[in-house]
Amino acid sequence: MNAFRIVRIPILPLQMVNAHLLIGPNGCILVDAGIPGSEKKIELALAQERLTFTDIKLIVITHAHIDHAGSAAIVRERSGAPIVAHEGDAKHFTQEEAMTFCPTGWVARLYIKTPVMFRPYRAFAPDILLRGQETIDLSRFGIEGQVKPTPGHTAGSVSIELDRREALVGDLVASGILLGGIVRTGRAARPPFEDDPHAVARELDRLLASGVETFHIGHGGPLKAAEVERHVRSLLLLPPALEHKRCCGGSHSETLVHSAK
């Protein structure tokens, strides 16, 4: 029952931003939708697999950042597929509340000053909203796995845990430098922004304990379990959430509102 494939969609070059397709016997699942305008690259990736937008049966958005949710509304229009996401990020998808970004390093502090972070994306309300610890079984789509909440990168982050010891985890972890793609793509790193590093460590540790061996990620990757284990240990050396948020809430934080258009 594991006859499905994972196809990476290069939204930006050098694995800097990735979306993914899970292609099964009953169609496919799109995991993340990239920045605004990414529907063309998604369409090309589908065509290379002899698929079209109408073959997408479900859209999973791992969290509300623009590089993952930016084209979700237009892909839903083109495919007719429902969007699943978590209530923790719901007001960011609809743009009722601003996103707060906690930079994890100097690259992120530079990146947040670029126009990319301020580009609007079309607001949308997810069709299926996970609440609390709710999960979704993907077996009806021919994919043996579940969508599960994995908060930490954002409050509403989700991951897809597959029965064949793989997981698609969005920005729960990244790799490489400069958004993941230049060098060291097999070495785990913090993504540019992260709300709660200790919560991230707990979720990664849970996935490791459940037997996940390969982590497919939004920036760089994929990563092997041993490398993610090393990363978890490094996260636990960081200040706990309260102190992290206090630091993030000062001059290092940025709050952005994406206008709905």
Image (cartoon, helix red, strand yellow):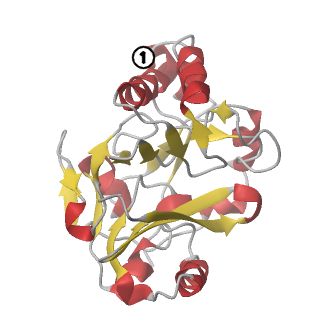
* Residue 176 percent location from the top left of the image: 74, 40
Please report the residue visible at 20 percent of the width from the left and 67 percent of the height from the top. Answer: 140
Counting labels gives 1
Q: Residues within 10 Å of mark 1 (few under 14, many from 20)?
A: few
* Residue 174 percent location from the top left of the image: 61, 41
Residue 141 visible in the current orientation? yes
The residue type indicated by label 1 comes to Leu
* Residue 189 percent location from the top left of the image: 65, 32
Residue 95 visible in the current orientation? no
Q: Quadrant of residue 148?
A: top left
Q: Is residue 87 left or right of residue 154?
A: left
Please report the residue visible at 30 percent of the width from the left and 85 percent of the height from the top. Answer: 80
As rendered, which of 214 and 199 lies closer to the eye? 214
Q: Is residue 127 left or right of residue 171?
A: left
Instruction: Give the residue number, with chain letter if any, for mark 1.
Output: 242
Quarter of the image with the N terminus in it: bottom left
As rendered, which of 19 and 223 lies closer to the eye? 223
Q: Quadrant of residue 137?
A: bottom left
Above-or-below relation of 197 to 142: above
As rendered, which of 84 and 66 lies closer to the eye? 84
As rendered, which of 203 and 69 lies closer to the eye? 203
Q: Quadrant of residue 154?
A: top left
* Residue 33 percent location from the top left of the image: 49, 68
Secondary structure, mark 1, is helix
Above-or-below relation of 39 to 109: below
